[in-house]
Amino acid sequence: MNRIALIAVPLLAVSLAACSSTGSTRMAQAPVVATPAPVVAPAPVVPTPAQTTQQAMLTTSVANGFVDPAALRQMTAKDSQEANSAQFYALQFGRPGAPRQWAGDRGTTGSIAVGPYVRVNNLDCRDFTHTVKIGGTDYVRKGTACREQNGIWTVEQGVA
């Protein structure tokens, strides 16, 4: 028993010596690993329907095959602006067979008649007839226009 007491007493003393009477306790901490913040891509900006319509109206031009080139050479900026607006609204919202009229400078007038919507290659298309009257002469352009995914109307087939 003496031998056990001789070994146990120093072990007890070493164990008690590890305790401090000052009241501070040290605990081991695991190293702090900084995790980088996840990279979040900004959400794509999706235009509103009104923005898409406005952009399409600005970029659908009668100079791109909607009007006879002979008439286009004689049209003023106001004529082209009025024709562009009428062409876009006729294609976008017009009733089949109901012509949309427009008037420009110096007696230049025009009208656009559209057919029903037809689905071609996953695009909405319409036949159109755009008549421009300058100085008593009628310039007629017929064709098929299709609305691209961005809302812009382009002439797919035009016939003078």
Image (tube, rainbow, N blue to C red):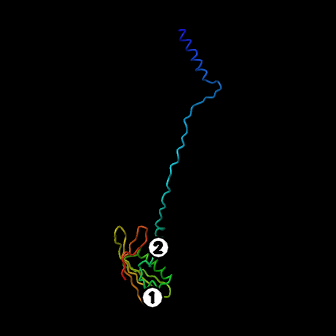
Farthest residue, direction bottom? 136
Q: Secondary structure at mark 2?
A: helix
Residue 140, image x, y percentages? 39, 84
Identify the disc placed on residue 134.
1
Q: What residue is pinned by disc 2?
A: 59
Q: Is 55 located above or below residue 80 in the figure?
A: above
Would you identify the image quadrant in which residue 126 lies? bottom left
Q: Residue at x 48, y 81 (%)?
A: 80
Q: Residues within 10 Å of mark 2 (few under 14, many from 20)?
A: some
Cα–Cα gap, marks 1 and 2: 24 Å
Farthest residue, direction right? 22
Would you identify the image quadrant in which residue 110 lies? bottom left
Residue 108 versus residue 63: which sits nearer the camera? 63
Residue 45 versus residue 48: which sits nearer the camera? 45
Q: Is 146 located above or below residue 106 in the figure?
A: above
Residue 81, image x, y percentages? 49, 79
